[in-house]
Image (cartoon, rainbow, N blue to C red):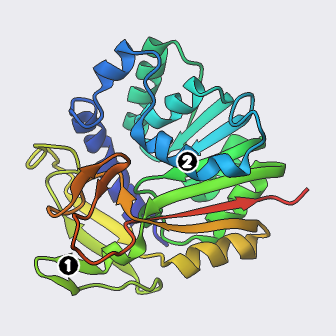
Amino acid sequence: MFEEAIATNRANWDERAEVHVRSRMYDVEAYLADSGRISSVVRNDLGVLAPHLPESGIVGRSLLHLQCHIGIDTLSWVRLGAVDVHGLDLSPNSLRHAERIAREAGCAVTWVEGDARRASELVGRRFDTVVTSAGTIVWLPELSAWARSILDLLEPGGVFSIRDDHPILGAMGFEPWEISDDYLGGGGTRTYTDSGTYTEDSAGQITHTTNHEWRHDLGEVVGALLDAGLAIEAVRELPYMDWPAFPELVACEQGWTLPPGRPRIPLNFAVVARRRG
């Protein structure tokens, strides 16, 4: 049903990968030069996940990273001590770069190409931890199969964590601030064209300019995970995000936040869920 839109997105992300590996935002060379470097995305993810891990943290736990893109965050989990690490992404060109970066970093990761909604069919094993974050689920047409796949991918007692852009942001225009699109899910496909991406100075670098996104409100995310049989352990709304989604944001320790005096709205959300033993 959504295959044409998914194929269009795949072509777009294949091109984005070429832009992103050269960007200051990802700073691949600095990452390779410093074997102790951990991405800010994973530092933020671990802050959400850590209270739900054993005393040893992520060390020694098998891990699957869904929608891993060029693998910088996936490799960060390896550097933190995760084992048997897998990264899955829709874009073959993203994975080509991820494989090269992992090889140069001396990290062992298994890379899998495919749709996150069908990850359990593609990977064929279970993990202690499954993670996804930072601009992922808007690229999925629906979440029921995604959530069932996550359940199937987890060992009994295993934990899943998502931290992503808060869905309220997709409903808002910022110049001026007003509601300009759906917040609630189920409104169909949002299609737009953009010759750039979210890294710096990227305008005009993408030729596959069409993007298809799908709104998923917070209730839909939590409901899909519950319906799949997962136990929700935490739901958080956070005042920061990983990229400057609109001009008013200012730098902060976690990434980007609203300046003092602006209305306090969530910029990220996070959900932690567990497969019962």
Where, quadrant-wise, is the C terminus in this rendering?
bottom right
Mark 1: few/some/many CA within 10 Å (<14, 14-19, 20+): few
Q: Residue lying farthest right? A: 277
Q: Is residue 190 left or right of residue 50?
A: left
Q: Residue drawn at (56%, 37%), measured in percent from left and top? A: 87
Q: Residue drawn at (43%, 38%), measured in percent from left and top? A: 92
Q: Amino acid at mark 2?
A: Gly
Q: Nearer the viewer, residue 99 or 42?
A: 42
Mark 2: few/some/many CA within 10 Å (<14, 14-19, 20+): few
Q: Residue drawn at (27%, 72%), measured in percent from left and top? A: 191
Q: Which residue is mark 1?
A: 173
Closer to the observer: label 1 or label 2?
Answer: 2
Q: Amino acid at mark 1?
A: Gly
Residue 218 at x, y percent in the picture:
52, 76
Q: Which residue is mark 2?
A: 47
Residue 13 at x, y percent in the picture:
33, 47
Residue 100 is tagged as none
